[in-house]
Image: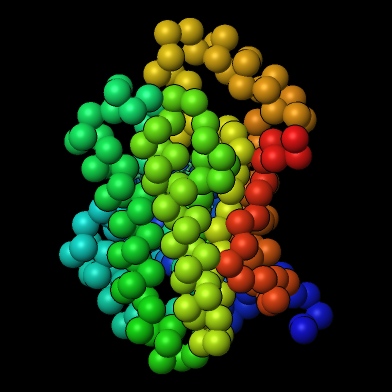
Amino acid sequence: MSKNPFNLENKTAIITGGASGIGAATTELFASVGAKVYVSDIDLDACQLRHRNSAFADNISVHHCDVADNNSVNTFVSAVLSEGPVDILFNNAGAGLVGTLPQTSEEDFDRLYNVNVKGVYRLSNALMPHFLERKSGNIVNMASICGVIGVPDRAAYCMSKFAIVGMTKAMALDHARDNIRINCICPGRIATPFMLARINEYPDPEAIRADMDASQPVGRMGEPEEVATVALYLASEASSFVTGACESVDGGWFAG
Ligand SMILES: NC(=O)c1ccc[n+]([C@@H]2O[C@H](COP(=O)([O-])OP(=O)(O)OC[C@H]3O[C@@H](n4cnc5c(N)ncnc54)[C@H](O)[C@@H]3O)[C@@H](O)[C@H]2O)c1
């Protein structure tokens, strides 16, 4: 193992959903430890704005990619591969939805499946021939505590995140002998625009925010940077014997 196993020098990473929150923080962190990062988002303007003044802008290349659209994914992945090999894929983009099953329209159910589950499928599938040819690759999928336990009011979201955990484990076994590691991250509540938007869907957002903070064993939500460091661990040599894992980063949520 190298001197600093968290170093990503000479590594290339693709990150989806990188305009904001966890994806943006991970882009910064990966670029800061030497990776060339191809960061993408459905909102290209927001992504450009977010990373334009980065201290590591030389290591960051910003692209449009809608993970819910095959053509968009294939165009993005082809553009990146035309510039050189890819080592790491962070399937981070995701959509959320508050609601019980009867409150979830079929349209919303299909939308979450298409973005969260098929988004992971599309990017992973587009890169897998490249990883197999190189006999080397690393995929980090964004799941959630909602991918391991049921959470009230999140029927479709839990469906999509459980699917990501299942896909991660099955793919990890399928490709364990190909030197391709596949893991997922299960964050608890993290203070990002994604989480704040969900809170604003409730009639009394302030009360819900206070409840959510208090319900975490540590008494607060996590910060995007606290998830980015877990993504770095999984994407780097530091986790060289780890595959098929669900790394929780949840302020003690799963402790009991
Ligand atoms: N914030 C939390 O508490 C929390 C907890 C567990 C898991 N997660 C997961 O973390 C991931 C990132 O969420 P975040 O909290 O940083 O949210 P965020 O809203 O800050 O960022 C999500 C990004 O994904 C992009 N995006 C949405 N749909 C897309 C699509 N179809 N194609 C490409 N990009 C798209 C958005 O434009 C946005 O920039 C999501 O998968 C989410 O489910 C978040």
Q: Residue furthest right?
A: 3
Q: Where 14 falls versus 24 (above or below)?
A: below
Q: Where 74 falls versus 55 (above or below)?
A: below
- Corner quadrant of residue 61: bottom left
> What's the colour scheme?
rainbow
Task: Find ligand 1 in the image and state its quadrant.
Answer: top left
Q: Where 157 falls versus 196 (above or below)?
A: below
For the image, the number of numbered tags is 0
Residue 92 visible in the shown view: no
Q: Residue at x 55, y 15 (%)?
A: 208
Front one among 43 and 92: 92
- Corner quadrant of residue 156: top left
**Whole-percent x and y of residue 113?**
30, 47
Q: Residue at x 66, y 49 (%)?
A: 248
Q: Judge left or right: residue 239 versus residue 165.
A: right
Residue 65 visible in the shown view: yes
Q: Which quadrant does the N terminus fall into?
A: bottom right
Q: Where 157 falls versus 79 (above or below)?
A: above
Front one among 74 and 142: 142
Q: Which quadrant does the C terminus fall into?
A: top right
Q: Residue at x 41, y 92 (%)?
A: 133
Q: Judge left or right: residue 16 versus residue 65.
A: right
Front one among 139 and 21: 139
**Whole-percent x and y of residue 142?**
50, 53
Q: Residue at x 58, y 54 (%)?
A: 185
**Whole-percent x and y of residue 187?**
60, 44
